[in-house]
Amino acid sequence: MKDEKEQLVDEILRLRREVQTLQQELKKLQERLPVKSNKPQTYKFKENRRSKPPHLWGRKAGHPGSWRPTPDHIDREIKQTLKVCPDCRHAFGEAIAVEKHLQEDIIPARVEVTQFLRCRYWCRHCKKVYTAPYAEDEVPWGHLGPRTLAMMVWLKYHLALPGNKIKDILHDLCGLTVSEGAIAQALQRLGNYLHIENAQILTAVKEASLKHVDETGWNINGASHWLWTFVNQQWAFFHIDKSRGSRVPGELLGIPHQGTVVSDFYSAYNKLEGDKQKCWVHLNRDIRETRDAFPRGEDPPSDFMDPRKKLRRLFADAERLASQRRMLSRLAFIRKIRRLKERLFMFGSEPYSHPFWQKMSARILRHHRSLFTFLDKKDVPSHNNTAERSIRPHVIIRNRSFQNRTPNGALAHSRLSSILQTLRLQHRDSVHAIMSAYPKHRQGYTAPLLFP
């Protein structure tokens, strides 16, 4: 027994000496290698080498061409003729052919001033004075017409133009003189009279089977606030609040909420009671940003790359399974979902040495029930891009202006943005819809007209 132990000790010592020898040889070989530089490498191409463009624009060869569609009507026709030859001055007879050319142009806008006359009558029987009703497009006590107001909404909340540029457009292109203050006050009045339409949007969002949620920073007279968005494929509701806590989505969506809420990993959404789907794009974005933080030219350590590859493979399998929903039987599909959820739970339960994956595994364990909801429900996506896209115009407005100066302006911003974005999601003419509904609400009509 003692002899065997001594032999094992001798064998261990011999192996250690061999390891030290191999390490010394490896170090010598590494010293012979050229030193890597962090500077970007420049490549010299041969003079006769033809470099191809990164992308060939236009349609591929052999495909039919594309051109502007022919107008369906002609408003006016201008015919050009010649009576004599420009060279010899000999008289021409009848034209042998006509060359046609269609040209589309915009009629210059002009201000149309309308005077509304409402006649008043004395009833001898009732002993009262009666006044004729308002005209269909008349805005009571308003000096700007409904088309102008609807155009202001479109310019501000769709094109993200500030008040001074809206003033310039109305003056230079339409000949209408209006101040920035008048524009702000007109939009606030418009938002107040269309509040019933905004309430209908919130009701539709609450009852929807799917909604995306997100928030971004906002200022009211320099004070920090938050702009919340609740949106799906048909409805968009925006709300500006001083709080970024869970109270806001809880009050607006209800506790528990109906349907499925898609969001990022912000903690305010954790207290929502109901089905949730967490955004995989945000998860992959955090991983990519950490990967890009490593020094360029150096490979990240294996304790970071190995879990990254494993999680990417897990998500790829989930995406592939979602695309095979119709091809698999219901029992087989459910069985594969169960396996994926087990793999995700085991991934979050494993011990990791890298600090990033220690933090990420805790997040996955906390939300493992909400990461594969898009497999359990057919129409639920795995990302929150819908909310990201809906909030993008507000980010542009934030960068181009001081946001809002008063709470009334913030309220008008949220209401008019909700109405305009919802009309566009439903592929409706937003300008015509607003200019048709606003005069009726201003005249006292209290039922919803845009979203009955």
Image: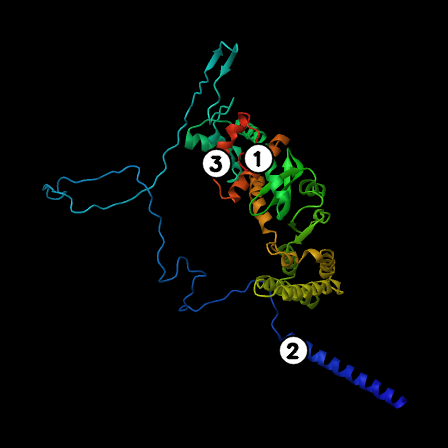
| Residue at image coords 48%, 32% | 436
- Residue depth check, mark 3 versus mark 2: number of the one nearer the observer: 3
Q: Quadrant of the C terminus?
A: top right
Query: How would you rate the neighbour count of disc 1 (Cα within 10 Å): few for under 14, some for 14-19, many for 20 or more?
Result: many
Q: How is the image coloured?
A: rainbow
Q: Nearer the viewer, residue 395 or 386?
A: 386
- Residue depth check, mark 1 versus mark 2: number of the one nearer the observer: 1
Relative to 378, does residue 116 appear above or below in the rendering?
A: above
Could you tell me if residue 396 is visible in this image? yes
Q: Nearer the viewer, residue 350 or 405?
A: 350
Q: Are marks 3 and 2 in contact (CB under 8 Å)?
A: no
Q: Earlier in the sequence, mark 3 or mark 1?
A: 1
Q: CA distance from mark 3 to mark 2?
A: 73 Å
| Residue at image coords 47%, 67% | 44
Question: Residue 269 placed where, x, y %?
Answer: 70, 48
Res 10 → quadrant: bottom right
Residue type for callout 2: Leu
Badge number at residue 197: 1
Relative to 370, does residue 142 appear above or below in the rendering?
A: above
Relative to 37, does residue 116 appear above or below in the rendering?
A: above
> Which residue is tagged 2?
29
Residue type for callout 3: Val
Q: CA distance from mark 1 to mark 2?
A: 75 Å
> Which residue is tagged 3?
431
Relative to 306, does residue 71 appear above or below in the rendering?
A: above
Residue type for callout 1: Glu
Q: CA distance from mark 3 to mark 1?
A: 15 Å
Query: How would you rate the neighbour count of disc 3 (Cα within 10 Å): few for under 14, some for 14-19, many for 20 or more?
Result: some
Q: Earlier in the sequence, mark 1 or mark 2?
A: 2
Question: Residue 124 placed where, x, y %?
Answer: 49, 9
Q: Nearer the viewer, residue 449 or 40?
A: 449
